[in-house]
Image: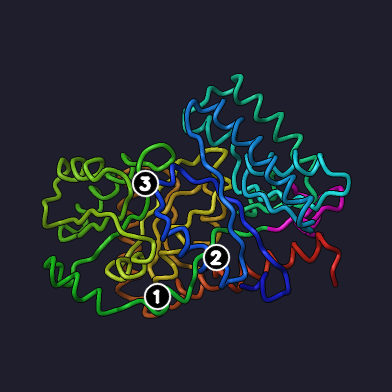
């Protein structure tokens, strides 16, 4: 909205899976009208998933061709490319035009390293080396950059910390994963009582986990933590909101002493997240502390804080440790050990019991660091202004 209200028109290009499976004609028409009402024109192309490399190359050239035609007919000022593959489409299209628009590379994360850290690609292998070459070219071709964390800025553009620009004078902005704070502030608090009554939770402490399991998301460590926490408080209740298969977490929970009355696992829509988080008292976030995750801004942490929940997280992930300690909104563990698990849980239990300002402090932290309008909107508008040399 802030970009639109600043007088900029916006068009977006998405790649969708088989429309027959994911979209009905009426849903497409409804989404298009809703976006038009927000001043956004939506274009879409079909997404091809397999075989992985040929399908991606095919989609890159389709996207580049569409973008080139769009540039010729609409003459946009900025191509905003979110992550590497769209950035490649934009860079190719820009090269094909004599006086192309500015290319904003919204890097989001260390894409090649993410795939090696997750075990999907061989470190130093052919795919990794090929993508690193493409990345190097994209960094040369781009006119500005967005990263998610100060850690990522420190690694990629350290000179921009004081000036807001890289060594070539191109603007760099840190914009973390944000949340619509208003949705969490105005959540239906009656839901907390209704859910707790329905599942006989009463006044038990509820720890919640939002997100997937596997890969960078540490299933074993999460279960081990919950097992250790249960030793501290055997009345503990666990609320899991995940798109992963429920059995991935239900069986491990049962194997370490949680009965069916001690947990709830389910899928909920993004719109329902604020209500379900209102049930909880603490948010849990364990992510593999590897090189690529220094560029990560976990959305779940912003959602926890916006809900007034203190977080228990591990170090080595983006700016999470610094933010949590600076704002006093939870506990950071330095190693995955039973002692660290229990110490962190005892500390947070003490905060819940004795710190009456804790929930407000968590929400203030979310508003200051992750609000969609006051942080995300303002910073995107600022980098657009710099790209266009506007006052």
Q: Classify residue 220 by image quadrant.
A: top left
Q: Residue tagged by mark 3?
A: 212
Marks 1, 3: nearer the viewer: 3
Contact? badges 2 and 1 (CB < 8 Å): no
48 is higher (above) or lower (below) than 350:
above
The residue located at (49%, 62%) in the rendering is: 324
Indicate the position of residue 118 as horizontal and vertical percent values: 47, 33
- Quarter of the image where one finds residue 218: top left
Residue 387 counted in the magenta span: no
Q: Which residues are magenta?
A: 157-173
Spot occupied by residue 357 in the image (x, y as percentages of width and height): 41, 79
Give the number of the mark in front: 2 or 1: 1
Q: Which mark is residue 42?
A: none
Q: Are marks 1 and 3 in contact (CB under 8 Å)?
A: no
Q: CA distance from mark 2 to mark 1?
A: 15 Å
Mark 3 crowdedness (10 Å alpha carbons): few <14, some 14-19, many ≥20: some
Rendering coords of residue 341 (x, y %): 33, 50
Residue 325: in sight, yes or no? no
Residue 160 painted magenta = yes
Sequence-first tag of 2 and 1:
2
Instruction: List the single residue furthest toward the top.
Output: 126
Q: Which residue is mark 1?
A: 359
Q: Is residue 321 left or right of residue 21?
A: right
Q: Which mark is residue 326?
A: 2
């Amino acid at each position: 909205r802030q970009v639109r209200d600043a007088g900029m028109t916006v068009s977006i290009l998405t790649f969708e899976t088989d429309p027959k499976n994911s979209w009905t004609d009426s849903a497409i028409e409804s989404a298009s009208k809703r976006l038009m009402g927000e001043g956004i024109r939506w274009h879409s192309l079909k997404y091809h998933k397999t075989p992985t490399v040929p399908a991606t190359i095919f989609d890159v050239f389709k996207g580049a061709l569409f973008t080139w035609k769009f540039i010729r007919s609409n003459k946009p000022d900025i191509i905003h490319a979110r992550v590497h593959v769209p950035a490649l489409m934009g860079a190719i299209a820009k090269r094909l035009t004599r006086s192309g628009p500015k290319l904003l590379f919204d890097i989001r994360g260390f894409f090649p390293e993410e795939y090696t850290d997750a075990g999907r690609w061989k470190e130093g292998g052919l795919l990794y080396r090929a993508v690193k070459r493409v990345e190097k070219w994209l960094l040369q071709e781009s006119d500005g950059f967005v990263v998610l964390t100060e850690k990522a800025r420190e690694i990629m553009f350290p000179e921009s910390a004081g000036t807001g620009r890289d060594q070539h004078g191109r603007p760099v902005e840190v914009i973390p994963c944000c949340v619509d704070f208003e949705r969490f502030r105005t959540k239906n608090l009656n839901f907390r009582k209704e859910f707790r009554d329905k599942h006989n939770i009463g006044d038990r402490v509820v720890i919640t986990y939002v997100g997937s399991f596997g890969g960078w998301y540490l299933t074993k460590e999460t279960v081990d933590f919950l097992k250790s926490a249960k030793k501290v408080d055997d009345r503990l209740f666990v609320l899991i909101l995940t798109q992963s298969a429920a059995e991935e977490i239900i069986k491990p929970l049962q194997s370490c002493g949680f009965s069916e009355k001690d947990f709830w696992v389910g899928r909920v829509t993004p719109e329902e997240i604020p209500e379900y988080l209102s049930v909880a008292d603490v948010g849990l976030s364990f992510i593999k502390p590897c090189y690529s995750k220094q560029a990560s801004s976990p959305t779940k942490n912003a959602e926890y804080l916006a809900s007034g929940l203190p977080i228990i997280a591990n170090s080595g992930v983006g700016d999470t440790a610094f933010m949590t300690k600076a704002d006093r909104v939870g506990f950071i563990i330095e190693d995955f050990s039973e002692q660290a698990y229990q110490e962190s849980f005892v500390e947070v239990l003490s905060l819940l019991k004795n710190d009456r300002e804790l929930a407000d402090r968590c929400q203030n932290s979310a508003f200051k660091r992750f609000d969609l309008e006051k942080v995300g909107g303002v910073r995107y508008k600022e980098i657009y202004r710099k790209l266009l040399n506007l006052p």
